[in-house]
Image (cartoon, helix red, strand yellow):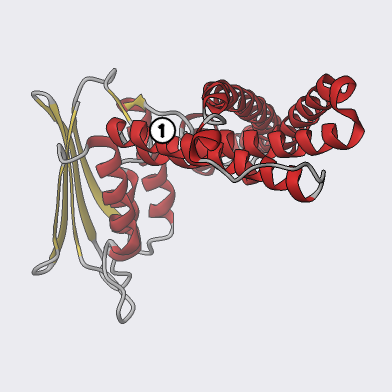
Amino acid sequence: MNMKIGRQAPGIVQLQVLIWTAVSLLLFFSVLPMEGLLKSAIATVVNTISYAIIIYGNILFLYPVFYQKQRFVLYGISVAFFLILTGMLKGYAEIIIARHVLLVKTGPVDLLDLLAYVPGGILIYVLSLVFRIAIAYFTLKQQTEEILLQKSQAELNLLKSQVQPHFLFNALNSIYYRVYKVDLPSAGLIERLADIMRYFVDESPKDEVPVSTEVAFIENYIALERIRIRHGASVNFEKAYNPELRIPPMLLMTFVENIFKHGIDKSRKQNRVTISLVQQNDFLLFKTSNHKGDTEPGDQPGGFGIVNLTKRLRMLYGDKFELTIDNEGELFTAFLKIPL
């Protein structure tokens, strides 16, 4: 996990500010009785900056660039070089400040004197790992709380969204019982419309639905679409499967929708459509065939619906499905084979 400190939520940033404030105060008051106000302030600033460089240099750069990419040898070498460089720079800064700010006479800067500051950085390096774990923990905790909040909000929105459909269901039921007494066929269509809407609300959000439920939805859709066809349509729907089989919802609907969108010729007195849904061994085979109907210039059967369906099939089944489209000749044929 790359710890992008600058992009963390305000709670994480505030936590770090609080920690560094506590560290600075602890450093300042621990040396104040011995060094006085000025020296204590300078020592606090120098030490705090060096600690921050070691901690953030490790958790923001060295750890993600080398360790997380399993470059363990390079990570060890980089850490050693980084600690030596940081320790020597800290020592050099303290000597220069003592000489020019505190006006303390010091001898020439010696390499061994600078190396003496390195061991102190090792403990800070170990603390940087603890610091990183702490940030990761609080980040994860905060993300979990946000997810729970979003989940609660989503559930509330879902309840709100279901109020209107359920109100409409009740209204359709009332209309159905009134129409049923005077026009039985129309009442049946109202009932099918209510079932379609109920499918969208209750079933389509699920990961899987019984094949029988999916087929019932398709049959309701076909019944409503046939109303709009002046000369009617002959639909032969062959079914041979275990009704308890479960498949992702709305997986077969694209083909049926294409039939009534692209495969119906309003000038033809009889439109013939054949649909088959057959279980064969461990596969489910779905096939549709229809004459090409009225299409607008540049409007191809399938279109974006087939493209989106293909993407969804790849997400669901990888390369274990078969989808073929035959647009040659007078017939448009679609075939889908999915594993069970």
Please identify the quarter of the rendering in which residue 264 is found.
bottom left
Q: Amino acid at mark 1?
A: Ala
Q: Position of residue 209 (x, y in %)?
A: 38, 26
Q: Quadrant of the C terminus?
A: top left
Residue at numbered disc 1: 80
Residue drawn at x 66%, y 45% as measured from the top left:
93
Residue drawn at x 71%, y 32% as measured from the top left:
16
Q: 100 or 14: nearer the eye?
A: 100
Q: Looking at the image, is 192 positioned above or below residue 279?
A: below
Residue drawn at x 24%, y 62% as measured from the top left:
270
Please identify the quarter of the rendering in which residue 285 is found.
top left
- Describe residue 252's horizontal placement relative to residue 12 as left or right: left
Q: Position of residue 69 (x, y in %)?
A: 32, 36
Q: Position of residue 23 (x, y in %)?
A: 76, 26
Say if residue 320 shows up in the picture.
Answer: yes
Residue drawn at x 36%, y 47% as measured from the top left:
222
Say if residue 196 shows up in the picture.
Answer: no
Q: 175 or 326: nearer the eye?
A: 326
Callout 1: SS:
helix
